[in-house]
Image (cartoon, grey):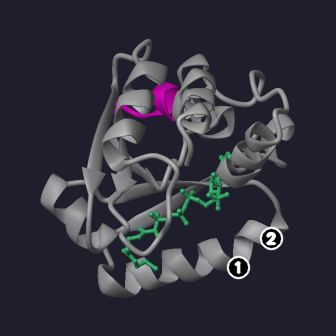
Amino acid sequence: MVVVYPGSFDPITNGHLDIIERCSKKFDKVVVSILYNPSKKTMFTVEERKEMIKEAVKKFTNVEVDTFSGLLVDYSKAKGISTVIRGLRAVTDFEYEMQMALMNRKLDDELETVFLMSSNQYTFLSSSVVKEVAIFNGDISKLVPKVVNQAIYKKLKGGL
Ligand code: COA
């Protein structure tokens, strides 16, 4: 079975990677897809995010990195994928995720969303938290892949 794991990934964190790794063991193929979202102010361009994810997942042979714009249901249909993966970190994620999953199913009743519980050590993690810690010179090396750690500090030195 092929699944899609969509998101903003600005930037990818070890929490996302944990979900990707676990999916790569359970499914034949995982497509990690980055949303082009002009309304969200991001630290990294979609191309930069794509390159970082590619580097971070290169050890998994069944993980592909892609981008999409518009509706997830349209993208999934065009790719022939009918299963979406989302991670649930805490109860606070639940309402938003449920709304999104139900809306997606309303738009396409073939599309199922499968939720994976985040591993314990990542329940507090988000891309914003990582960026905030980095801005104030905190150590993010245990929270993100090496490629992201380097890219954030490079970006911050160059000014946002
Ligand atoms: N570990 C760590 N952090 C995680 C995580 C995990 N397992 N899962 C989510 N997060 C964090 C992200 O880092 C992000 O943090 P931030 O808010 O600090 O940046 C936050 O949770 C949510 O991000 P993400 O999982 O990337 O979701 P999103 O809300 O940015 O994107 C899409 C959701 C892209 C799947 C959704 O908006 C979409 O499909 N859009 C297309 C339009 C569409 O079809 N709309 C109809 C559906 S309602």
**Residue of label 1:** 95
Question: Residue 102's x, y, as percent?
Answer: 50, 82
Which label number is shown at residue 80? none
Q: Which span of residues is magenta-colored?
A: 23-30
Question: Based on the displayed image, in which of its 4 quarters is residue 73 positioned?
Answer: bottom left
Q: Residues within 10 Å of mark 1 (few under 14, many from 20)?
A: few
* Residue 119: % across, % down: 78, 38
Q: Residues within 10 Å of mark 2 (few under 14, many from 20)?
A: few
From the top left corner, tell me how far across and down residue 4 is, in percent: 37, 49
| Vertical arrangement, residue 17 with respect to residue 141, above or below | below
Residue annotated with mark 2: 92
Q: Position of residue 125 (x, y in %)?
A: 77, 46
Between 45 and 22, the one nearer to me in the picture: 45
The amino acid beneath tag 1 is Glu
Foreground residue among 115 and 124: 124
Q: Which residue is rendered at x = 43% and y = 31% of the image?
A: 53
Q: Quadrant of ligand 1?
A: bottom right
Splitting the image into 4 quarters, where does residue 93 fall? bottom right
